[in-house]
Image (cartoon, rainbow, N blue to C red):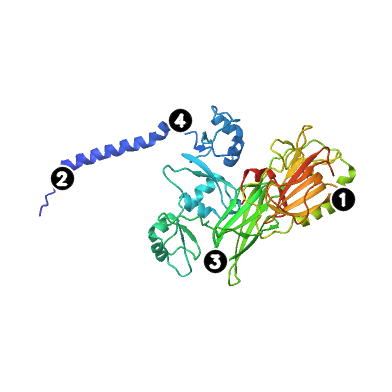
Amino acid sequence: MAISVQVSIFPLKMHKHILTLVLVLILLMTTSPVLAQDVTPSPGPVYIVQEGDTFYDIANNFGISLQDLLDANPLLDPNSISVGSRIVIPGLQGIGGVLTSQVVGFGENITSLSRRNQVPESFIEKLNHITSPYELYAGYKLVLPQKENSTPLSGIVELTRGESLLEAAVHENSDPWTLVQINSLAGSWDGAPGEILLNPAGSARDRQGGLPPAFINVNVTPLPMKQGGTIVIKIQTQPGVILSGFLVDKPLHFFPTEAGSFVAMQGVYALLTPGPYPLKLIATLPDGSKQSFEQLVLIQSGYYPNDPMLNVDPETIDPAITVPESQQVEAVTAPANLQKLWQGMFALPVDQTYCLKSRFGNRRAYNGGGYDNFHAGLDFGICSPDHPFDIYAPADGVVVFTGKLIVRGNATIIDHGWGIYTGYWHQEEILVNVGDHVTAGQLIGKIGQTGRVTGPHLHWEIWVNGVQVNPTDWLNITYP
């Protein structure tokens, strides 16, 4: 039996046209890299200058040389860059767009920052040259991509023991699929009790991602810290919690505030070597159990200059004299009075028309020795024959010491509460007595030149929890 086979010519023509189209596409694909070489490559992402940035800091943050940064921005003056300026960052292959920076807060980690800003952890690590999570200490200036018309997520969901992601989502007016996507979870089962998840539909709270449940929020200012600075730690906790902790090697004292939170203040030693140091917070719960959190915080240099060499009476720099006297002052300024006595910003301890002879933190050397001392206060001098000699209390407090010392001369110490003390050295005359309650602006003494001096002046100190700090901060900032 014969079989008839019919073949249509039309499909054969279509196959021919398709074959031709495929060949053209292959040709275009193989030639496209050559065409791409003729296009000028992008110079790099753009960084938005933040407060306190310098060209050197920016180059260091991105791991590039200062010269490469200057070459990429020939029209900008490296000695004068303003906040908001846009600077091209060269050498970041595969990264584009607009970049900004933010300081890592205490309690934050790379996971919480990734979730809050909706940026993959791997991208943050690559952009900031992070090789270990331990490098991400509080005060670290982190570079992040800036998304237009977008703000970091602030709503949170905290998983409690035995609670499913679905239940937590319902409580926060969200859904588990959104929480999985926003927080880069493997699935609805991927969430540990106590874990902090970000939620675009939740109520805005300042709860940091790494803190235990006893801490509702922790605010540490300023970050980064600096030599000679006053650090303020404000904490909101669950009911009945007792707080303790330490910064560097100093135990912290927490005091309740009218707002229902707790505050601790701590000075940073002016000769402390810059670098990361531990800040640990401990919450003791009503049942006696403890929850704690520790993170490294960055302490920067105060950039204090050297004072001219000083020639003084050798007795006043003899350790046999200086050590016992310093120990005596440290003992007086050690207690932390539970009552806060001052209100608002501190006032000048002298009349408004004054001259400053030496600033806090300046490195000191005596009689040809090394610069291994620092100036622990502000020196207010007598700069004309009719200049006032009066000394005033800068804030309310209680006088806890008056007397004559070899190095400090005629000295007065006032307790302002909460571990804050002020000292007044080298007086000609002391006009108060131990136990006196003084008020801001009250006359307490006369400027003189007793003790280790090279001329008449008032040396004024502020102690914060056993450490001398820069008094200038207290004249410009209301603590706490």
- Residue under label 1, please give it: 321
How far apart, in angstroms, are the residues tagged by discs 1 and 4?
72 Å
On screen, residue 240 versus residue 393, left or right, reads left
Badges 1 and 2: C-beta atoms under 8 Å apart?
no
Amino acid type, label 3: Pro
Residue 375 in view here: no
Dot 1 crowding, Cα within 10 Å, few <14, some 14–19, many 20+: some
Q: Residue at x 52, y 57 (%)?
A: 209
Residue 239 is labelled as 3
Residue 433 in view here: yes
Q: Locate residue 267, reporting x and y percent.
A: 68, 51
Q: Which is more toward the observer, 389 or 69?
A: 389
Q: Which is more toward the observer, 267 or 77?
A: 267
How far apart, in angstroms, are the residues tagged by discs 3 and 1?
49 Å
- Residue under label 2, please give it: 7
How far apart, in angstroms, are the residues tagged by discs 2 and 4?
54 Å
Q: Which is more toward the observer, 293 or 28?
A: 293
Amino acid type, label 1: Ile
Which one is closest to the eye, mark 1 or mark 2? 1
Q: Locate residue 143, reporting x and y percent.
A: 53, 44
Amino acid type, label 4: Thr
Amino acid type, label 2: Val
